[in-house]
Image (cartoon, grey):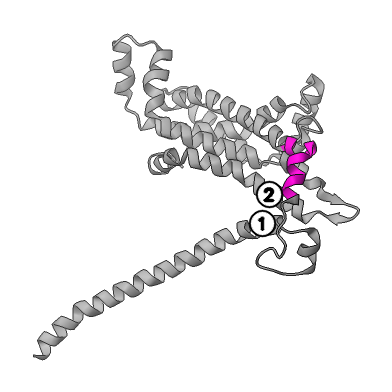
Amino acid sequence: MGAATMTASTPARSRSAARVGINSRAVVMAVYLIFLLLPIYWLLNMSLKTNTEILSTFSLWPQSPTLANYATILTDPSWYMGYVNSLIYVVMNTVISITVALPAAYAFSRYTFLGDKHLFFWLLTNRMAPPAVFALPFFQLYSSVGLFDTHIAVALAHCLFNVPLAVWILEGFMRGVPKEIDETAYIDGYSFGRFFVKIFMPLIASGIGVAAFFCFMFSWVELLLSRTLTSVNAKPIAATMTRTVSASGMDWGVLAAAGVLTIIPGALVIYFVRNYIAKGFALGRV
């Protein structure tokens, strides 16, 4: 009788322990999500307040919500052109980086040549170096050739660290594609260009998506080079946000609204390439 009761109570205890484990994991996950989303919520909260309310009271939500801060950004050319400039050179940089990285990654993944490992490591060292190291040389070079304060200047400067990153990511994906596919395509009469575009690129589409995502994000958030190489015509939003300091103090509301709007392009990119990113993290080098 006692043994039967003990046997019956064991599954019950197991189920109870399992429920406790699930509940504890749910609590941990909820706390973690709150920790991640709290800064974003607070930024949105500040963007809907006036400077007077931000500086005078502490509140978890706006007492008198206002869209004046967003109206300032969307009606002032010096503000919204910062977003336009940033999008222009970021898209240019992403296209250039992927275009250059694709053949380079193919060469590293398919061929063995003198100094290939040293060259590959040298590419990665450019990604490791801080942008401040290259700010002055780029500034002097672009000023000499007339590229200062242009979108192409920032796009080419960002290739310094985005091309090595894209090569590193794509090379990992390309190594996962059997070389027999290349040989079969050549036997079937495909030229290299046709084979690369029609057959090979679709096989590494997830890798291209991941590389494009990282190129976009790193170029979007970079400040030092984009601020050093521009002044008026191509000034990015990250540099424009620093102009909220005035004699009357910091314009916290407008700055928070600009921060909220700065998050949106990255969120849209993540949404549209989310499937490629998931495959990339599972299959590639990321």
Instruction: Please indicate whether residue 157 sits to the left or right of residue 119 in the image.
Output: right
- Could you tell me if residue 131 is visible in this image? yes
Dot label at residue 106: none
Give yes or no for residue 78 being in the magenta stretch: yes
Q: Which residue in the structure is indicated by mark 2?
A: 259
Is the residue 14 above or below the residue 138 in the image?
A: below
Amino acid at dot 1? Leu
Of all residues, the one furthest to the bottom in this rendering is: 2
Which residue appears at 75% of the width and 43% of the height?
73
Q: Which residue in the structure is indicated by mark 1?
A: 43
Amino acid at dot 2? Gly
Of 129 and 236, nearer the camera is: 236
Q: Main secondary structure of the magenta part?
A: helix
Q: Are marks 2 and 1 in contact (CB under 8 Å)?
A: yes
Query: Of callouts 2 and 1, which one flags the residue occurring earlier in the amino acid sequence?
Result: 1
Does dot 2 land on a helix, a strand or a loop?
helix
Residue 284 location, x and y as percent?
A: 41, 39
Q: Which residues are magenta?
A: 69-82
Instruction: Please indicate whether residue 277 sits to the left or right of residue 199 in the image.
Output: right
Residue 178 location, x and y as percent?
A: 32, 27
Q: Quadrant of residue 36?
A: bottom right
The N terminus: image quadrant: bottom left
Residue 68 location, x and y as percent?
A: 75, 51
Which residue appears at 77% of the width and 56% of the height?
252
Q: Quadrant of residue 10?
A: bottom left
